[in-house]
């Protein structure tokens, strides 16, 4: 195979990596906010449940969480949910690995939502109580204080840690190969097994490196635009 053919074949797998990245970010980032609010709830039972849930998810390796999501339904209920989705989507629409990808997306979304929630919580709790009190003195409601006084400062403060998590996310998509999702690493392994080509496995790093570089530039620009919120 030529260099261009190998690159095109690897890029087909990288599309799956990008799909996992995009869906996790679009679903996990918003989901992290209600989890953060639950972790800060004045109701002890809600706060405790949320904190224990976050502790469990953050404490278990993401690869193991993927295994749990994918295999547990079959072990507990004797029903291969994601296997059936794989088969149905392939026979009906020719879509490969639909069930496996869905399992990965669920695991990634839950995992990153918990990480994002801790970033949100840290950002919100970093705002001094004096700013809340100043807003109340001016006649603002609690929601107005949060939207007009607190939120912009929180956004500025969480951008650096969020950037780190987002960059980590694109690299973590490689974990999808643990249940044989046809992402870029699996495609490289296939070339090694069928074509005796080892170098594509190392070449996959270039795809991640380029995408991380683009993300770094974009997130750096976002951080610079928010610099005027610094106190």
Image: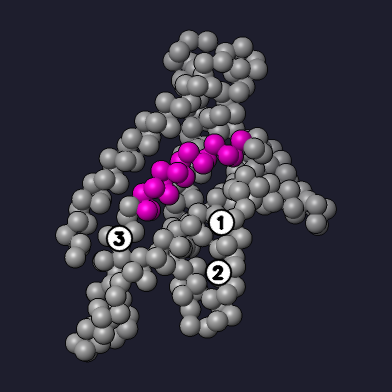
Q: Are marks 3 and 1 in contact (CB under 8 Å)?
A: no
Front residue of this view, candidates 116 and 207:
116
* In this rendering, position of residue 80 left or right of residue 116: right
Judged by its main secondary structure, the magenta piece is helix
Q: Earlier in the sequence, mark 3 or mark 1?
A: 1
Q: Are marks 2 and 1 in contact (CB under 8 Å)?
A: no
Check residue 157 in the rendering and tell me which mark sits there, or answer none. Answer: 3
Res. 63 image quadrant: top right
Residue 149's place in the image compared with 110, above or below, is below
Which element type, helix, strand or loop, lies under badge 3? helix
Q: Is residue 144 visible?
A: no
Counting from the top left corner in percent of width and height, residue 211 is at 38, 35
Counting from the top left corner in percent of width and height, residue 52 is at 60, 68
Check residue 20 in the rendering and tell me which mark sits there, or answer none. Answer: none
For label 2, the residue is 51
Q: Earlier in the sequence, mark 2 or mark 1?
A: 2
Counting from the top left corner in percent of width and height, residue 76 is at 80, 56
Q: Residue at position x 19%, y 65% from top?
A: 231
For label 2, count other residues whose C-alpha is less than 10 Å away and answer few (under 14), some (14-19) or many (20+).
Answer: some
* In this rendering, position of residue 23 left or right of residue 162: right
For label 1, count other residues whose C-alpha is less than 10 Å away and answer few (under 14), some (14-19) or many (20+).
Answer: some
Q: Which residues are magenta?
A: 161-177
For label 1, the residue is 58
């Amino acid at each position: 195979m030529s260099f261009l053919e190998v690159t095109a074949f690897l890029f087909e797998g990288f599309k799956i990596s990008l799909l996992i990245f995009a869906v996790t970010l679009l679903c996990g980032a918003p989901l992290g906010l209600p989890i953060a609010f639950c972790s800060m709830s004045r109701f002890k039972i809600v706060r405790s449940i949320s904190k224990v849930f976050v502790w469990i998810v953050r404490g278990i390796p993401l690869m193991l969480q993927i295994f749990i999501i994918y295999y547990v339904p079959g072990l507990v209920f004797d029903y291969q949910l994601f296997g059936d989705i794989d088969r149905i989507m392939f026979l009906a629409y020719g879509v490969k690995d639909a069930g496996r990808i869905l399992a990965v997306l669920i695991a990634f979304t839950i995992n990153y939502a918990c990480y994002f929630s801790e970033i949100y919580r840290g950002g919100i709790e970093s705002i001094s109580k004096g700013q809340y009190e100043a807003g109340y003195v001016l006649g603002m409601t609690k929601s107005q204080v949060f939207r007009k006084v607190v939120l912009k400062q929180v956004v500025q403060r969480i951008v650096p840690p969020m950037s780190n998590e987002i960059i980590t996310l694109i690299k973590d998509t490689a974990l999808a190969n643990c249940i044989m999702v046809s992402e870029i690493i699996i495609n490289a392994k296939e070339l090694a097994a069928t074509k005796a080509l080892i170098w594509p496995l190392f070449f996959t790093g270039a795809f991640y490196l380029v995408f991380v570089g683009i993300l770094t530039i974009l997130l750096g620009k976002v951080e610079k635009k928010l610099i005027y919120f610094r106190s």
